[in-house]
Each structure stands twice: as structure tokens, then as C-alpha cells.
């Protein structure tokens, strides 16, 4: 039964690409980009992947994101994930990406999306894996930051199938109400 399930074609519908960064690739990218990381080996980092709560996951997530600097880095991250998809018989994947994680660090939006998208195109051609790209906004950043990111995405809208807007838990006077979001979204479409 196990091999039967393993051999079935699969679809992955919700995956954040930055969360797929494996320890070995993280170390390779850190070395390539001359970035210090607080682990002495991929094995030590893998041990730290035993998360006890959301914050422990996020701490490593952001340390990992710091090694992603160039278009090639984003390509390599995405390609490594797609090779695992091929091994697992995933034939279609819908990938979330968090551009604000990178633009906040001074990485250009186009660096992020071009690297990811190039790997997706290569995977379709070389591996037969189809994909879609979904842009996310980080909930701890302001609504203004989200709309700035949305504007940065407009030249690349042919590469993005959807946008995931996660509202903060509480809408305060300083933030717009959910009712106004479609109106504001129309301004940039």
C-alpha cells in the first residue's frame, strides 16, 4: 500500500517556498554570499528544526531567508523544492512566496520573482511539473507596506495567479477596515 501511494501523482496546493530551504542549501548559499549563520553545520541546523512553537520556527525561517540574496539563490531554492516534488511524484504545485521578507532586507522584488519564476519554467519544461505562484503579505507589516508591495508586483502580474491578504487579528482605527480593501485594491489594478 505504501508504494502504491508513493507512486500516485500528487498536487501540492499550499506551500511557502521560503519554508522549504533545507540546511545543506542554506549553508551553500551562506557561503556563496559570505553570510554568517549561527550554526556550525547542516546537522546542527537540522537539529534546530525540531520546533517547539511558532516563534522558534520563525527565528530559523528569517535566518534562512537572510541567505537569499540573488536571483540565482531564489532559483536554487525553488529548483531544490521542485526536484523533491519530482521524487514525490508531485505533478502540480501552487507556491506561496513572501516578497516582503526580502524587500524589507533591500532585495529587489524582481530579484525574488524572476529567480522563482525561472525555476518554475524550467521545471515545467524539464520535469513536467506545472505550477502557479501566489504572493503573500506579511501580517506583522502595515497595510501601507502591503500596498507598496502590490504596486511592485504589477509589472509581474502575468506570473502571479493570486494574492493572499491576511488581515491582522484586530482592525484598529489606524488601519483601514476590511470593507475598504477592495476599493484600495482597485486603485492599483
Image (spheres, rainbow, N blue to C red):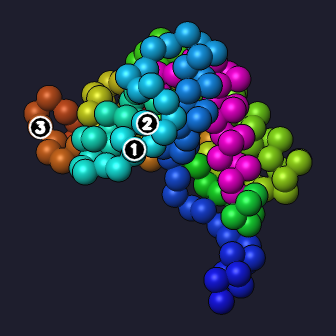
Badge number at residue 45: 2
Q: Give left or right: position of 94 versus 59.
A: right
The Cα atoms of the two marked residues, 3 and 2, are separated by 39 Å
Q: Which residue is mark 3?
A: 172
Q: Give left or right: position of 180 versus 110.
A: left
Q: Which residue is mark 1?
A: 47
Query: Magenta includes 35?
Result: no
* Quadrant position of the C terminus in the picture: top right
The Cα atoms of the two marked residues, 1 and 3, are separated by 40 Å
Query: Magenta includes 78?
Result: yes
Badge number at residue 177: none
Q: Residues within 10 Å of mark 1 (few under 14, many from 20)?
A: few
Residue 165 showing in the rendered view: no
Residue at the location (44% across, 47% down)?
164
Dots 2, 1 in contact, CB < 8 A: yes
Residue at the location (55% across, 10% down)?
34
| First in sequence: mark 3 vs mark 2 | 2
2 versus 177 height, above or below? below
46 or 80, which is in the foreground? Answer: 46
The answer to which quarter of the image holds residue 32 is top right
47 or 149, which is in the foreground? Answer: 47
Q: Residues within 10 Å of mark 2 (few under 14, many from 20)?
A: some
Residue 10 showing in the rendered view: yes
Q: Residues within 10 Å of mark 3 (few under 14, many from 20)?
A: few
Amino acid at each position: 500500500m505504501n508504494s502504491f501511494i508513493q507512486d500516485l501523482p500528487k498536487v501540492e496546493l499550499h506551500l511557502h517556498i521560503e519554508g522549504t530551504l533545507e540546511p545543506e542549501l542554506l549553508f551553500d548559499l551562506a557561503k556563496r554570499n559570505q553570510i554568517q549563520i549561527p550554526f556550525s553545520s547542516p546537522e546542527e541546523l537540522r537539529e534546530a528544526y525540531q520546533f517547539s512553537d511558532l516563534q522558534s520556527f520563525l527565528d530559523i525561517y528569517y535566518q534562512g531567508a537572510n541567505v537569499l540574496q540573488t536571483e540565482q539563490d531564489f532559483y536554487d531554492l525553488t529548483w531544490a523544492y521542485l526536484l523533491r516534488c519530482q521524487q514525490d511524484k508531485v505533478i502540480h504545485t501552487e507556491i506561496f512566496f513572501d516578497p516582503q521578507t526580502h524587500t524589507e532586507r533591500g532585495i529587489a522584488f524582481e530579484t525574488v520573482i524572476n529567480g522563482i519564476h525561472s525555476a518554475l519554467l524550467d521545471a515545467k519544461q524539464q520535469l513536467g511539473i506545472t505550477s502557479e505562484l501566489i504572493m503573500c503579505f506579511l501580517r506583522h507589516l502595515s497595510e501601507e507596506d502591503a500596498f507598496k508591495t502590490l504596486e511592485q508586483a504589477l509589472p509581474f502580474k502575468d506570473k502571479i495567479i493570486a494574492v493572499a491578504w491576511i488581515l491582522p487579528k484586530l482592525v484598529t482605527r489606524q488601519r483601514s477596515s476590511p470593507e475598504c480593501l477592495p476599493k484600495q485594491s482597485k486603485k492599483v489594478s
